[in-house]
Image: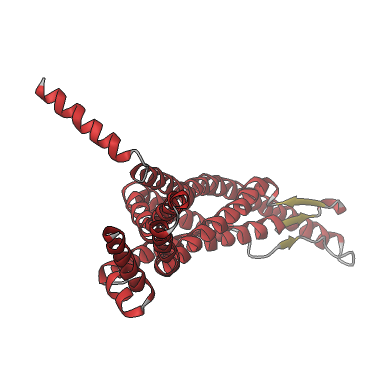
Amino acid sequence: MRKKLLLSGVLVVFLLFSLLPTPRGVLYDNALFQSVDTAALTYVNEALVRAGGSYVIARTINAVISVVQESELMVQPAGVGVTLALGQALDPVNDLVERFSWVMLACLASLGIQKVLIEISPWLSIQVLLVGSLVFFLMSLWSPERFAANFARLGKSLLLVVLLVRFCVPAIAWINNAAYGAVLEQRYDETINEVKRDLETLQAVVPDEGVAAIHLPEKSAGWLEKTRQALNQAAEQSLSVLDFRQRLEAIKRITTGIFDQLIQLVVIFVLNTILLPLFFLWGLLRLGRLVFAPDFGLMAEMHMRERMSGKNR
């Protein structure tokens, strides 16, 4: 009974520290914890800036390609109309840019969720989950024996969730940022710089006007004037078609590079904002389940005995 009263007193003290603002700030929201949260938010904000910038670039590429696809050269030799569309070969790149935009929206949503979790984790973990865990532990001490084990199990489970919410979310942001700096940062910088250069080059070769039209000479002109205008018309058409073909080849070459670079950015952002955080969360969950397993202490003791017996041999 004395031990039960002592444990109950300790639990009540921690419960009060979790509910009252001043002691909660000293114990759970001190400068160390706040610095961890601030660092995690900084990492997530930097990732949001990168993802937002890439989304803006993708929309700019989409706008430029749309202008290219709508651009055309109309040539009318001998009264027969011929239309050459500049953007007929750009549909695959345009489709990829659209899908890249959706991927970037998903990455932005993932980063936004991580940021919200970091911001609410102090309140959710301490004032909600920890309070519930302590209440369950108190109930396990003073409830009938047949219910005590269930309340104790619920208390341990909530305590594990407290640790995950309070520490694992900032830890995941920190580990993910470290992985990004070690593996992905250089590749991202190189790829995004290449995309920006290709985008500037693409904007330079896009026709200034959507439609360039070449008209026949007026019927009222004399035959000599008509002949001169026809010769000028033929020369102008040849130059226009040659310029069109040069632009088309340049656009194809540039958009092929952009296609490859967007694939690289998709891989970088999906790894950095979705797959790696999920992998780290899974690893921390497995570690937490291992630590809080009922037979963890027995397993550790048996492992130490085996090591000691091996040394004695």
For residue 168, above or below residue 121: above
Q: Position of residue 221 (x, y in %)?
A: 86, 66
What residue is rendered at 35% in x and 50% in y? 186
The residue sitting at the left extreme is 312
211 left or right of 242 in image: right
What residue is rendered at 66% in x and 60% in y? 67
Q: Position of residue 301 (x, y in %)?
A: 23, 35
The residue sitting at the bottom extreme is 22
**Residue 7 falls in image quadrant:** bottom left
Q: Position of residue 226 (x, y in %)?
A: 83, 60
Seen from the viewer's position, the closer of residues 7 and 146 is 146
Q: Quadrant of the N terminus?
A: bottom left
For residue 15, above or below residue 274: below
**Residue 126 falls in image quadrant:** bottom left
What residue is rendered at 40% in x and 60% in y? 142
| Any part of residue 103 in sight | yes
Seen from the viewer's position, the closer of residues 100 and 73 is 100
